[in-house]
Amino acid sequence: MRLEEVTDAFLRTLDIHTVLPQQEPFVMVGSLVQFALDTSTTETRIAEDNLFVEDGFFSAFGMMENIAQTCAARIGFYNKYILLKPVEIGYIGAIREYVVYGLAEAGSLLTTTVDVEEEIFGMTLATATVRCGDRVLATARIKLAVKNAA
């Protein structure tokens, strides 16, 4: 598949499990809804029985995992559909400037966008924003490494 062939309609029908190394019950993203080399977006409906729901709210830890898995979905999609190779396992190298402005209630729809600042030698530096509707819930800078990067 070429980048210009990636459509929002295709992304919304994609089984997120095919581009993530994580599996249930530890999947914290629902669908990849936008993909480009420098930015990707996921949407996630927070289930009441989610591992990171505490007292009816999705925790700060859950939002961090949601950010990490949005990064993983981006890398997994690129590997599987553009480069035609297996999904690789990534590792968080650093999280900086993680600021939580609020929490989402169970049942809420989160939209998480990751903007790539730099990619080199299997390392990715990105900024992330988690939103619930128009409200920004969290922001962070994240550094990731891919295990099998050459």
Image (tube, rainbow, N blue to C red):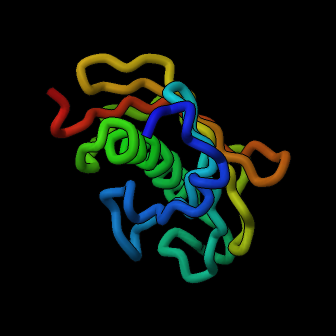
Q: Residue at x 14, y 26 (%)?
A: 150
Q: Is residue 21 above or below residue 83?
A: below
Does any portion of residue 99 appear in the rendered image?
A: no
Q: Is residue 38 left or right of residue 78?
A: right
Q: Position of residue 43 (x, y in %)?
A: 64, 56
Q: Is residue 123 above or below residue 58?
A: above
Looking at the image, which residue sits at the far right?
Answer: 134
Q: Nearer the viewer, residue 142 or 9?
A: 9
Q: Position of residue 111 (x, y in %)?
A: 68, 51
Q: Nearer the viewer, residue 1 or 124?
A: 1
Q: Residue at x 37, y 26 (%)?
A: 124
Q: Position of residue 106 (x, y in %)?
A: 69, 73
Q: Is residue 63 above or below residue 97?
A: below
Q: How many marks?
A: 0
Q: Quadrant of residue 56?
A: bottom right
Does any portion of residue 132 appear in the rendered image?
A: yes
Q: Is residue 4 left or right of residue 119?
A: right
Q: Residue at x 44, y 66 (%)?
A: 27
Q: Residue at x 82, y 52 (%)?
A: 133
Q: Position of residue 128 (x, y in %)?
A: 58, 35
Q: Nearer the viewer, residue 73 or 52?
A: 73
Quadrant of the rendering where the N terminus is positioned: top left
Q: Nearer the viewer, residue 150 or 132?
A: 150
